[in-house]
Amino acid sequence: MSPVRSIGLQAIALSLGLFHLYSGLFGSFDASIQRGVHLALAVAFFALNSLRDGAPWFNRSSLVLGLAVIATIAWRMSEHIYLTSERFEFVSPLTPLELGLGAVFVLAILELCRRAIGWVLPALVLVLFVYCFVPGLPGLLKHSGYSLGLLLDVQFLTYAGAFGIPLSVSASYIALFIIFGAFMERSGLGALIIDLANHAVGHYRGGPAKVAVLASAFTGTISGSAPANVMTTGALTIPLMKKTGYPAHWAGAIEAAASTGGILMPPIMGAIAFLMAQYTGIPYLTIATIALVPALFYFLGIFLAVHWAAIRHDVRPVPRAEGSSAWAILKARGHLILPVVILIGLLIEGFSPQYAVSYSILAVIVLSWLKPSTAMRFQDIRDALVNAAGAIAFVALTTAVAGMVVGVFEMTGLSLSFAQEANTYVVGLLSGLILTMVVSIVLGMGVPPSVSYIVQIAVTIPIVIGFLKASGMDPATAMLIAHFFVMYYASLAVLTPPDALASIAAAGLAQAPVMKTAIYATRVAFVAFIVPFLFAYKPTLLLQGAPLEVAIDIAFAVVAVIAGSVALEGYRIAWFRSIDRVVGVLVAIGCAYPDHTANTLAALLAVVWGSRIFARYRRVTLAVS
């Protein structure tokens, strides 16, 4: 990289970091300024970073596109008083200048997004644009046609399209948490988490895989990206798993599944929690609390799958290093955890997420200086800002384009039409939820979970709310469950084939076949595909109900997860027989069924069945001894 380009990227990254820290500490600017500066700096970083030294002129078109977007945003910010106070949205006709600037902005941002994440999301936007210009379509697609001026009004001049709520959340919340994650990673927290996880479970059977599960659960919630989590923790855990006896595809699958779970783990949840708070009106801290139980189910299922795989592949424990202790690890670097404690403490005290994370970012730097061995130097701060800027640019581009999808759905009323039409074709809640699951995974291919979730706020969530209300659920609970249901499958799209970004990253590190790794990763994460159906039928699993009822249903769900793991993974193990897998399926279904009589009978069957398995295990162990 040339010195000039390197300095330019560092200057943009510093500007981006300071802008968001200032707005987090002292309050956001006017919406036009906050979102405009955020997107302009993100586009500038992406365009400059996309250049390649010595490349021919036609490979430098990203810079031209970036300058075009920045120029249109600059005009929009300079005219924000006129746009918000003097003209009437969707009524005042666009001038030729506004038409030209809007067209340039839309085309340039779509092309930059395509270069950032591929063609899936931009292609969806183009299809929706074409749909707006084709009147008289049959059925639910029918409309009277929309003009180019109205479309550009929605997408460029108002807050209903590219500058809507998705970009607002990116500019207000997501960017700050990306910066926080970059600083925490640079300070050495990731290595500390891996060391603590290794000390806690590394010496048990399948230890390296269990280390991957624990470490990924904690680092993933901060990083917010499953592929990035794979590259961070997987670089250490995947070689260890292979060395101790896991096949390469299993090592990659375990890391991919665990890293994807980090997005579902509170407190940060890859920033989806803040999006959900924005759209539902439910406080962020409430959402993070509600999300804890399903996330623990997810990691319990992965832990069990890892354990059965370790027995099946005869993975032996790795002895703990002599003289090592958790106290020694914490004494050397335990202060690096304090910024996370400060963040959670400020949120509990009622401070806004922007304020809490901004002070936590400053705390990362200050607290790292408590020991010379962990002190962040100027180059560490610089590198953290540059890494954060790259991730922010990626999210800003995709949220702006996702806002275009939401804008079209709101302008045409397509989401309401979909919801009404779906209710006429779906028979029963189960078929409706299965249909939503498939659509959510398909819409999540090739895009970050947060972007997929935003798109589905206009597409699938109204449909799920309709299904749940039709089944007799009250509207407030139906809204909460619908958002969580869709969020889960939007997150799992990065794991499932064919477009499994987390599995692709893990397969590369493990040197294993991509599709085989993705299929096994989906199998390891089986609980995640079941949990949304559990809380759709039992809202108590999202803490909606009396404490005793919540506790009882959580206990039944734990039994269901354990039985399901035996049914799925309990083969080629000496003390599991074929009949055990059949009984496991019956117990899992019985404990998950929304009826306490069936739950109780299944739990009693589980006690008898589990006793027989344990007795068989004791006989096999004694025989081996």
Image (cartoon, grey):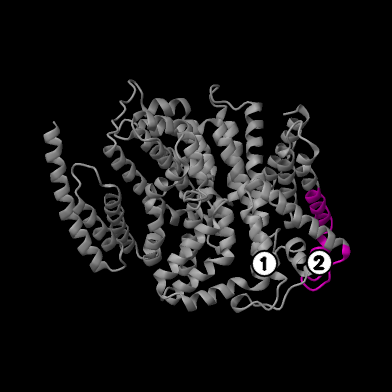
* Residue 577 image position (x, y, % from top left): 19, 49
Look at the magenta stretch and give its main secondary structure: helix
Pointer 1 residue = 408
Kind of residue at badge 1: Val
* Residue 541 image position (x, y, % from top left): 37, 60
In the visual, does 356 lie left or right of 93?
left
Q: Is residue 337 visible?
A: no
Q: Quadrant of residue 434?
A: bottom left
**Which quarter shows the C terminus?**
top left
Kind of element beneath mark 1: helix
In the visual, does 372 lie left or right of 429?
right
What segment carries the magenta color? 68-96
Residue at 58% across, 40% down: 180
Kind of element beneath mark 2: helix
Q: Is residue 135 visible?
A: yes
Q: Nearer the viewer, residue 11 or 616?
A: 616
Kind of residue at badge 2: Ser
* Extreme residue in the right direction: 96
Residue 103, numbered label:
none
Marks 1 & 2, CB-CB < 8 Å contact: no
Q: Residues within 10 Å of mark 1 (few under 14, many from 20)?
A: many
Pointer 2 residue = 85
Q: Residues within 10 Å of mark 2 (few under 14, many from 20)?
A: few
Q: Nearer the viewer, residue 36 or 552?
A: 36
Q: Nearer the viewer, mark 1 or mark 2?
A: 1
In the visual, does 582 lie left or right of 333?
left
